[in-house]
Amino acid sequence: MEEKTYKLMSRTGAMNITFGVICIVTGITAGVMLIIGGARLLAEKSKILF
C-alpha cells in the first residue's frame, strides 16, 4: 500500500511541475503578444481618419 502511495505522489508531483512549466511558457508568450499588439496599435493610431 505504501508503494502505491509513493508512486502516485511522485507521478502527481511530476505532473504538477510539467503543468507549471507549460503555464509559465504560455503566460510569457501571451504577454509578449499583447505587448506587441498594443505597440502596433499605438504606432498606427495617427493613420486613422474620422
Image (spheres, grey):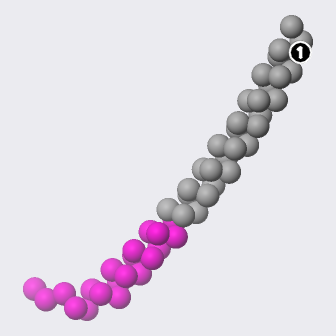
**Could you say where residue 49 lies in the image, as x and y percent from the top left?**
13, 89
Q: Quadrant of the C terminus?
A: bottom left
Residue identifier under label 1 = 3
Q: Main secondary structure of the magenta part?
A: helix
Q: Quadrant of the N terminus?
A: top right
Residue stretch in magenta: 31-50
Q: Secondary structure at mark 1?
A: helix
**Could you say where residue 44 lies in the image, as x and y percent from the top left?**
30, 87
Q: Left or right of 27: which side holds 6?
A: right
Q: Left or right of 34: which side holds 16?
A: right
Q: Left or right of 27: which side holds 8?
A: right
Is residue 45 on the magenta stretch? Answer: yes
Q: Left or right of 34: which side holds 9?
A: right
Residue found farthest to the top: 1
Residue found farthest to the bottom: 46
Residue found farthest to the right: 2
Type of residue at label 1?
Glu
- State the residue in front, 33 or 48: 33
Q: Give the quarter of the image for residue 24.
A: bottom right
Q: How many numbered marks does the figure carry?
A: 1
The answer to whether residue 5 is above or below residue 47 is above
The answer to whether residue 15 is above or below residue 20 is above
Is disc 1 surrounded by few (<14), some (14 to 19) or many (20+) residues within 10 Å? few
Residue found 65% across the figure and 43% down from its top: 19
Is residue 19 on the magenta stretch? Answer: no
Residue found 44% across the figure and 68% down from its top: 34
Q: Give the quarter of the image for residue 43.
A: bottom left
Residue found 52% across the figure and 70% down from its top: 32
**Could you say where residue 3 lies in the image, as x and y percent from the top left?**
89, 15
The answer to whether residue 47 is above or below residue 19 is below
**Could you say where residue 36 lies in the image, as x and y percent from the top left?**
45, 76
